[in-house]
Image (cartoon, helix red, strand yellow):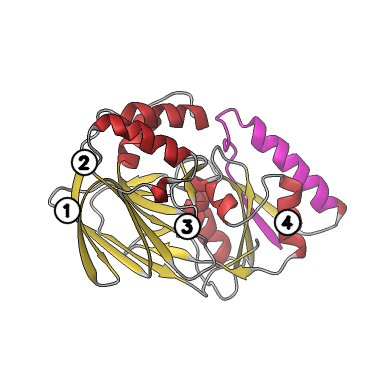
Amino acid sequence: MLDFIINPIAGGKHGKKTRKVVSILKKILEWKKLPFNIHFTREHGHAKTLTEDVIKKGATDIIVVGGDGTLHEVINGFSNFEKVNLGLIPCGTGNDFAKAANIPLDAEKALDIVINNQPKYTDFMQLPSIRGMNVIGTGIDVDVLKRYNALKKKNKFSYTTSLIKTLFDFEYTDFTAEIDGIKHSFRSFIAGIANGSDFGGGIPICPIATPSDGMLNFVAVKEINPKIKIIGAFLKLKKGKILSLKQTMTMPCKSVKITSDKPLTINVDGELYENIPFEVSIVSNTLKMYR
């Protein structure tokens, strides 16, 4: 039995994209005579509750139809990793983790992976009380998200516009990162822990990251002066060349703990969290995902 957790407004508040995808999925599943259940989310956070409920009722295959936000909620409602598999039909605005996991954006092709492939162990990130699938960070990405979330119209272009505007009025963050037990001090405009390669709808923060290697990738971009040079750094980021910037530090690791004199807002897969410890570790050989 396939249990689909569907965000009806993924990819746009009017739900046109989701309705088209759901129609395609139903036709294929009915034609193949495969048993399935459909569960629509009603509000923010509902995907987590739905996941908890269907697993308690014996679900074995949970398929997310949505974007990175819906996937984030579902993994945080996940349990019984031995008996429950995860699938993804990308249907959001960004679909960054789908890219990292090599899941096609075409709904029919993505469903074909679920139907015909065996699930594979897929890494995820664990904070003390929250799980993340794609990227966890703090710094300018938090400011960008706050600006982006205030917009009425949300898409890849408006995210990039929010990023450009934020580049010129953000404040650098001083923090200490304990990476696999070794401390490093930074004055940086972003610190990210990457399991996937992209964030923000296709911005390659760490092109070398992959959710199947049993490693995290720590990325920090140190202070850039004068600020006008940030434009060049932004262009490198968009082209997937941020790791070549001399102010960028990156290293593979198993765990990262970040502390600062100031309270940190943490971005986990595009969701903002306040007042939680920034302590991240990799979890491997636990989650089985169709990819």
Q: Which mark is residue 260?
A: 1
Where is the N terminus found, in terms of image quarters? bottom right
Contact check, label 4 and label 3, Cβ < 8 Å: no
Give SS at disc 1. Answer: loop
Label 2 sits on what residue type? Answer: Tyr
Label 4 sits on what residue type? Answer: Phe
Of residue 203 and residue 149, the one placed in the foreground of this image is 203
Which of marks 3 and 2 precedes in the sequence?
A: 3
Residue 209: image location, x then y, percent: 48, 58
Residue that mark 4 sits on: 36
Label 3 sits on what residue type? Answer: Met
Which of marks 3 and 4 precedes in the sequence?
A: 4
Give SS at disc 3. Answer: loop
Cα–Cα gap, marks 4 and 3: 25 Å
Cα–Cα gap, marks 1 and 4: 47 Å
Q: Does 22 lie within the magenta span?
A: yes
Residue that mark 3 sits on: 133
Mark nearest the camera among 2 and 3 is 2
Please, which residue is most extreme toward the left here?
261
Mark nearest the camera among 1 and 3 is 1
Q: Which residues are magenta?
A: 1-30
Cα–Cα gap, marks 1 and 3: 24 Å
Q: Which mark is residue 172?
A: 2
